[in-house]
Image (tube, helix red, strand yellow):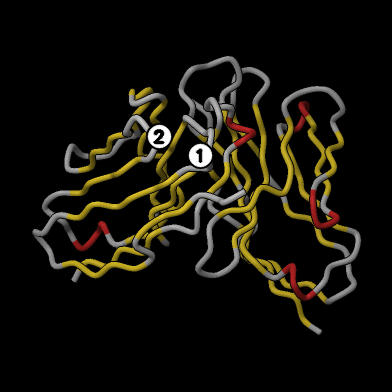
């Protein structure tokens, strides 16, 4: 079956702009999580959605937001981009939020200039 | 809150030699523990996981890990390393019995395999 699909793979944005990243989970998976990966901070949890509801949110400013649609696809949005937002953003999906069942996508590499 | 420490930032190992990556966790109850591998520019692939039961866990690609509660450790091992094992390895912990649905990752260990 198809894996977790993240689009776009690469993105270059200017400071102050906003960006939307997309994640299509594995068919049948209803839980989607987002993580930010940077050389300095490592992998950090952003948020988790299940059946269109955010169940948990990490320690990120309000500029970071997300949502999940009825088909389980998820988007995350970052407004007023800062240089420090440059990172690999990873999405993971699971049937129910069972952590052992998380499958990660290849990520979206965001560069803010 | 749970946390993970991977003491080794970088390990170099010869092809065919054994490999052991260290992981120490902090969590009040029995944690869910994971090892992931990441190749350059790629996402994370799950190698193995521990929830309960047998403390020696077998994973994919010939990897295994042992949960030691007394030492709060979950070290990853492979008896004979192949050049394709060169990658970054992450240990992660999840909170069992909670509803926070998140993983806390260690900083990662980069493995270099020399011929």
Residue A101 lies in quadrant: top right
Of all chains, the one bearing label 1 is: A
SS at mark 2 in the image: loop
Q: Residue at x 82, y 61 (%)?
A: B19
Left or right position of A82 against B26: left
Q: Residue at x 50, y 53 (%)?
A: A105
Residue B84 lies, in percent from the top left, at 74, 72
Q: Report the residue marked by disc 1.
A: A93
Residue B70 lies, in percent from the top left, at 78, 27
Q: Residue at x 14, y 49 (%)?
A: A79
Q: Nearer the viewer, residue A71 or A8?
A: A71
Closer mark to the observer between disc 1 and disc 2: 2
Residue A72's label in the rendered image is 2
Estimate the spatial distance between the alpha carbons at disc 1 and disc 2, rounded to whole Å.
9 Å
* Proximity of marks 1 and 2: CB atoms separated by less than 8 Å: yes
Query: Within 10 Å of the Cα at label 2, are there few (<14), some (14-19), or many (20+) other Cα atoms?
Result: many
Residue A4 lies, in percent from the top left, at 50, 49
């Amino acid at each position: 079956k198809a894996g977790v699909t993240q689009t776009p793979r690469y993105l270059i944005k200017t400071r102050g702009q906003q960006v939307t990243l997309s994640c299509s989970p594995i068919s049948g998976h209803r839980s989607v999580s987002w993580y930010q990966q940077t050389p300095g901070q490592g992998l950090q949890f952003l948020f988790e959605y299940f059946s269109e509801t955010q169940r948990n949110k990490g320690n990120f400013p309000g500029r970071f937001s997300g949502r999940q649609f009825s088909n389980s696809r998820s988007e995350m949005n970052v407004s007023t981009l800062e240089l420090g937002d440059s990172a690999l953003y990873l999405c993971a999906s699971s049937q129910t939020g069972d952590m052992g069942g998380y499958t990660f996508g290849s990520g979206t590499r965001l560069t803010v200039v | 809150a749970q946390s993970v420490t991977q003491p080794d930032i970088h390990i170099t190992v010869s092809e065919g030699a054994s490999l052991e990556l260290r992981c120490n966790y902090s969590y009040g109850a029995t944690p869910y523990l994971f090892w992931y591998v990441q190749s350059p520019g790629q996402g994370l692939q799950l190698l193995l996981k521990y929830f309960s039961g047998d403390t020696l866990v077998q994973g994919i690609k010939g990897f295994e890990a042992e949960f030691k509660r007394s030492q709060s450790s979950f070290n990853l091992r492979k008896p004979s390393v192949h050049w394709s094992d060169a990658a970054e390895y992450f240990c992660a912990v999840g909170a069992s019995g909670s509803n926070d649905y998140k993983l806390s990752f260690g900083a990662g260990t980069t493995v270099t395999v020399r011929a």
